[in-house]
Image (tube, helix red, strand yellow):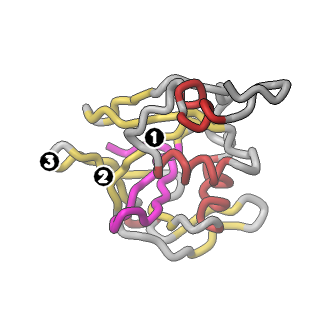
Amino acid sequence: MILHAGLVALHLGGYWRGVLIQGASGAGKSDLALRAIDAGFRLVADDRVIVWVCEGRLFGRAPAPLAGLMEVRGVGVLRTPALGFCEIALAVRCGEAERLPDAERTEICGVPTPSLTVQPLEASAPAKLRRALQHLGQAAEGAYQHSPVACILPRPGGDSR
């Protein structure tokens, strides 16, 4: 299957974890990918991603004519060091993000994939991709309310009970 999307990857835990960046044309997919690359990610594919499943895991790569190429709006199409393929660990939609969203999954080629929505042009968007990958599978719901740290923080007025 070919998707209109971008794919970048981050080396974590000894292997490359891919982030599939989806959104409408002009939504900021390539801009987010470019800033993620500057933040330590590697390009896998820009604009089009070939997606497939192997042993229940989702993978992606660039179509051959686009491999190693990235459109940088206002500059042109540039040759960029790229990975040949990677496993897709996270699907990101470009759009208006909720402040505290519930954990979501998107089914891609029949594989449930963790997903989230980010505002691609927001300065912190690449950092959010990194944090999301680092915390995959960790339930954050209620973390502030149930954290041991929250129990030892002083209450307003100095009372720490």
- Identify which residue is drawn at 49% across, 58% down: 8
Q: Residues within 10 Å of mark 3 (few under 14, many from 20)?
A: few
Mark pair 1, 2: CA separation: 12 Å
Q: Which mark is residue 55?
A: 3
- If you read the primary sequence from the N terminus, does the residue marked by circle 3 or circle 1 appear first? 3
Q: Position of residue 92 (x, y in %)?
A: 52, 40
Mark number displayed over residue 14 = none
Label 3 to label 1: alpha-carbon separation:
19 Å
Prevailing secondary structure class for the magenta stretch in the rendered image: strand
Q: Is residue 3 left or right of residue 128?
A: left
Q: Residue 91 — which label?
A: 1
* Residue 20 within the magenta-colored segment of the rendering: yes
Q: Which residues are magenta?
A: 1-21
Q: Which mark is residue 59?
A: 2
Q: Secondary structure at mark 3?
A: loop
> Label 1: how many residues lie within 10 Å, few (<14), some (14-19) or many (20+)?
many
Which three-letter amino acid code belongs to the residue tagged 2? Phe
Relative side of 49 to 26, left or right: left
